[in-house]
Amino acid sequence: MNGVFITIEGVEGCGKTTQIARLGDLLASKGYNVLLTREPGGTALAERIRELLLDPSNHAMSPLTELLLYEAARAQHVEERIRPALEAGAVVLCDRFADSTTAYQGAGRNLPRETVLALHRIATAGVWPDLTIVIDVPAAEGLRRASRVRRQDRIEGEPQAFHERVRECFLELARQEPHRVRVVDGMQSPDAVADAIAVLVAGFLDNRSAGR
């Protein structure tokens, strides 16, 4: 595939959605063909699964059911939108992807890591981010920010300890895969976060163009 797959990750309220939109605008202004998408979601079917996953009334959903729904939405998303865009040479920017499932369902829900990774392999069918940027903020701060702008969804309503495990998993992934997963300090101003992300992405794209 000729395209580039970049994902933005982090705990609730870290500013992912704002920053991915800014990055999309920046890359489009430089002439890149950009697909901006999100998970769970990105297709009509996956957006319906998103509604099930985030609806606070679905409190009886088991962790395994939750995991399978996320992977089902991802399989549709990859097949219908992400893979075709990458094959067409686009830069795909995705607000969350499989690393979120590793963090939320693996670490947060305490599901076996090997189960989560096995389902990733099935759902993604070999499509994996080239670069992942984690916007890091303390879990309590992220939840505080999120509560200011929207009503809590089913995931945001989990106890703080759940979100602490999620954050630590993202940081662990960055330690394990420093070539792919990069961390940006989300406690900076939004402009400073945007600048840091722009520098990381520009460096990555330059290296890729040079074949490094």
Image (spheres, helix red, strand yellow):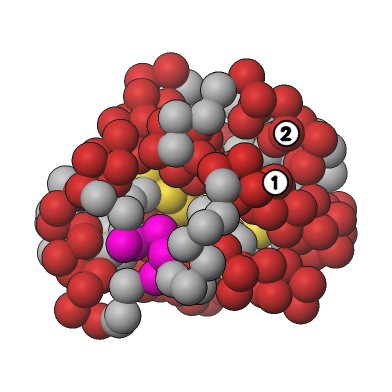
Q: Check disc 2 and give the amino acid type.
A: Leu
Q: Earlier in the sequence, mark 2 or mark 1?
A: 1
Q: State the image coordinates of residue 114 (x, y, percent, origin top left).
A: 62, 19
Residue at 76% in and 77% down = 44
| Quarter of the image that includes the N terminus | top right
Residue at 21% in and 58% down = 142
- Label 1 neighbourhood size at 10 Å, few (<14), some (14-19), many (20+)? some
**Relative side of 165 to 57, left or right:** left
Q: Residue 48, located in which quarter of the rendered image?
A: bottom right
Q: Residue 45, located in which quarter of the rendered image?
A: bottom right
Q: Circle 1 sits on which residue?
A: 68
**Relative side of 15 to 122, left or right:** left
| In front of the other: 153 or 190 | 153
Q: Is residue 202 above or below residue 146?
A: above
Q: Circle 2 sits on which residue?
A: 119
Tell me how far mark 2 sits from mark 1, CA to CA: 8 Å
Q: State the image coordinates of residue 183 (x, y, percent, origin top left).
A: 32, 38
Majority secondary structure of the magenta segment? loop
Can I make out residue 200 in this image? no
Q: Which stretch appears magenta?
A: 153-157
**Relative side of 177 to 40, left or right:** left
Q: State the image coordinates of residue 116 (x, y, percent, origin top left).
A: 62, 30
